[in-house]
Amino acid sequence: MLPPSLPRTGGPRDADVSIRQTDVDAAGARLSAVQRNYIRDPFIRFLVPRAHLQSPRPPLINIGTYVRSAAIDELVTQWLTLSEKEGTKCQIVSLGAGSDTRFWRIETGPHRESLSAYFELDFPEVTTKKAMAIRKSKELSAVLGDRDAVHLEHGGMALHAPRYHLLPVDLRLPPTQALAPLFSGSSSPPILSPTLPTLLLSECVFVYMSPTSSQALLRWFVDYFSSRSEAGASVLGGVVYEMFGLGDPFGKVMLQNLKSRGVSLPGADPYPNKESLPNRFRQYSFTTSQALTLREIRTAFIPSTEQERISRLELLDEIEELELVLEHYAITWGLKVPTETSLSADWNSWGLKEQTDERPGGEDGE
Ligand SMILES: C[S@@+](CC[C@H](N)C(=O)[O-])C[C@H]1O[C@@H](n2cnc3c(N)ncnc32)[C@H](O)[C@@H]1O
């Protein structure tokens, strides 16, 4: 039986097919960047049907995927490392996770022990498909741990493992109705601990929903953690990756192209320029909130050794076009440190740092 928070198919939400299809594009782009040696990800091929038949994407898309992955990997790795310094484990909640493989990369990487639990949320159609792919792949299943401890729920739409939870939900629904039962449900304690450092990831998701819906989501998470502060609520972080500044000619063409595919981007409206992006978190009194465009990240935040390696992978003629595209995508991060809490790690150091040395990095930071 469907939990009450899930939409029935056949209703008005069938217009969401195009939004769900964006996951196929995102996974295809990631696979392509792996095939062309931009990034390493041994797991993505198990989540893309007929992966061996997929053709690689153009260099411009591969470079964009690389820059975005390198930056978010870096933020996640720092989060895991800071939790270690704090002497605690942390949680990661990935909103609109689609076919993302980050959980598997963390679990097979050096910071595995820092992770208490990883949550992935998406439409039921997407989580069902992912749960089936996980069950079918011995490589993905092996990482989840003891097979007896892994179980499907809600007719195969949800999957639970000791440290991994795949949860079906329409994120536009009121969070008290949609999120509260997923995370707390009848289980005691709730599967989402209110007292561990928790990082929210939203990679190309909020942009597909109204600002009111994404604000309600963030507000719910802020309240979930701060209302328990006496019990030792901890640090809350957020990372949002998406398009912005779509009022210019480039943005108008992008909106028009997407419209022809049945996709609109209402979530971009409050963000006409880079300066407006940190408002995403500032409106909830996050201690820190910053944004960088992918263009800025590519030039100043990717180590030069990596920039050279990438430049040798494929011939790129359209450098101006690349820069135009990259300056319409940004990563925004925000940090909320509870007051009156003594912390041993320097959480305020969390963020992307300009590269002045030859530090290795860029690929799967986990
Ligand atoms: C562009 S894909 C990105 C997937 C993944 N975050 C990544 O970066 O590879 C957008 C994802 O957000 C999900 N999504 C968009 N709106 C949603 C909503 N209202 N509820 C649940 N999931 C949603 C889509 O189904 C899709 O999987």
Image (spheres, grey):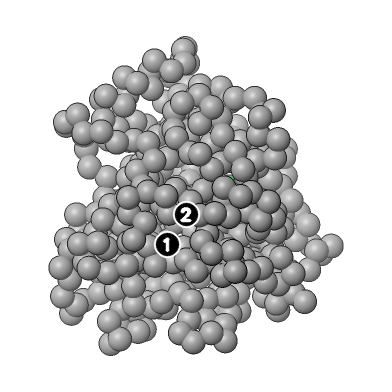
Amino acid residing under circle 2? Phe
Give the residue at x 26% y 30%.
Answer: 303
Give the residue at x 75% y 61%.
Answer: 13
Q: Position of residue 175 (x, y in %)?
A: 55, 74
- Front-most of 183 and 188? 188
Amino acid residing under circle 1? Ile
Q: Characterize the local packing of mark 2: few (<14), some (14-19) or many (20 or more) Cα atoms within 10 angstroms.
A: many
Label 2: element kind:
helix
Give the residue at x 45% y 84%.
Answer: 189
Q: Position of residue 218 (x, y in %)?
A: 45, 67
> Which circle's residue, 1 or 2, is located before the other in the chain?
1
Judged left or right of residue 130, residue 149 is left
Residue underneath mark 2: 103
Judged left or right of residue 145, residue 136 is right
* Quarter location, residue 27: top right
Q: Select label 1 or label 2 by which is in front.
A: 2
Judged left or right of residue 336, residue 37 is right
* Quarter location, residue 123: bottom right
Q: Are marks 1 and 2 in contact (CB under 8 Å)?
A: yes
- Front-most of 234 and 334? 234
Residue underneath mark 1: 92
